């Protein structure tokens, strides 16, 4: 029924002093249950997909930090498999990329670029920093979530880069992102 027709019907029922019949309540309950059955799995699937992207970018950050501590450089895109994570750079929902890295890089951005509308982009970054109290070299990391999902006006693409910030601060998130996790420091 059209919304106006429903409203008029309900007002007519109230004016006549009649209550809803058991059949009418059953139809309404069934309709609500059906809508919930249709929408909840889709929402649940999107949440699970987002968790997977967050976990993957977080793992890429930690692998970048460990790689830097061992070899004094970050992994570049051409050496993606050297992260040792056993993940595919492309899934049905995301493309995982590395921006930066290599022998002379002091910062690297790990990117989860959404392939499907409605999914948010995620980026993570690791950089070389310094512990001010001890002057030790360290790596600092951040994980960022896009404010808007792909397909919405002004949505992040997932190809943005983390910002470097000061020597003792972790990388920062671009304006179209929010920070997801606390920074992680690994010191050698």
Image (cartoon, rainbow, N blue to C red):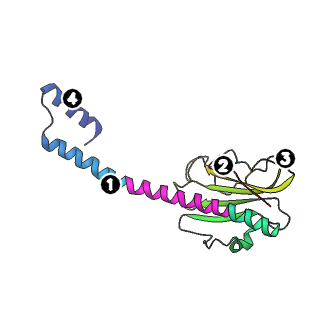
Front tag of 4 and 3:
3
- In 3D space, how far apart are the residues under numbered discs 4 and 3 (Cα atoms)? 73 Å
Magenta stretch, residue numbers:
40-60
User: Of 74 and 118, which appears nearest the observer?
Assistant: 74
> Which residue does the image show at 84% across and 47% down from the upper left?
133
| Left or right of 108 in this view: 178 | left
Q: Badge 4 is on which residue?
A: 11
Q: Earlier in the sequence, mark 2 or mark 1?
A: 1
Q: Earlier in the sequence, mark 3 or mark 1?
A: 1
Provide the secondary structure element on which disc 2 rests.
loop
Q: Badge 3 is on which residue?
A: 133
| Image: 55 above or below 91 | above
Q: Earlier in the sequence, mark 2 or mark 3?
A: 3
Q: Is residue 48 magenta?
A: yes
> Which residue does the image show at 72% across and 64% down from the upper left?
64
| Picture quadrant of residue 58 | bottom right
The picture places residue 31, in percent across and down from the top left corner, at 26, 48
Q: Earlier in the sequence, mark 1 or mark 4?
A: 4
- Are circles 4 and 3 on residues that touch, CB within 8 Å? no
- Are circles 2 and 3 on residues that touch, CB within 8 Å? no
Front tag of 2 and 4:
2
Provide the secondary structure element on which disc 1 rests.
helix
The picture places residue 25, in percent across and down from the top left corner, at 18, 42
> Which residue does the image show at 32% across and 54% down from the upper left?
37
- In 3D space, how far apart are the residues under numbered discs 2 and 3 (Cα atoms)? 20 Å
Q: Badge 2 is on which residue?
A: 182
The disc at residue 37 is: 1
């Amino acid at each position: 029924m059209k919304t106006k027709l429903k409203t008029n019907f309900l007002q007519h029922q109230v004016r006549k002093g009649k209550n809803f019949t058991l059949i009418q309540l059953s139809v309404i309950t069934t309709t609500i249950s059906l809508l919930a059955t249709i929408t909840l799995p889709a929402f649940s699937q999107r949440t699970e997909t987002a968790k997977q992207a967050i976990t993957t970018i977080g793992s890429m950050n930690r692998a970048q930090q460990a790689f830097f501590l061992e070899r004094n450089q970050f992994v570049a895109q051409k050496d993606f498999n050297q992260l040792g994570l056993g993940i595919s750079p492309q899934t049905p929902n995301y493309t995982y990329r590395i921006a930066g890295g290599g022998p002379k890089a002091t910062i690297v951005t790990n990117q989860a670029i959404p392939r499907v509308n409605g999914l948010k982009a995620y980026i993570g970054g690791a950089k070389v920093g310094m512990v001010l109290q001890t002057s030790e070299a360290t790596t600092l990391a951040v994980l960022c979530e896009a404010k808007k999902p792909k397909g919405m006006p002004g949505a992040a693409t997932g190809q943005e880069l983390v910002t470097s910030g000061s020597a003792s601060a972790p990388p920062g998130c671009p304006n179209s992102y929010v920070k997801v996790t606390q920074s992680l420091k690994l010191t050698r």
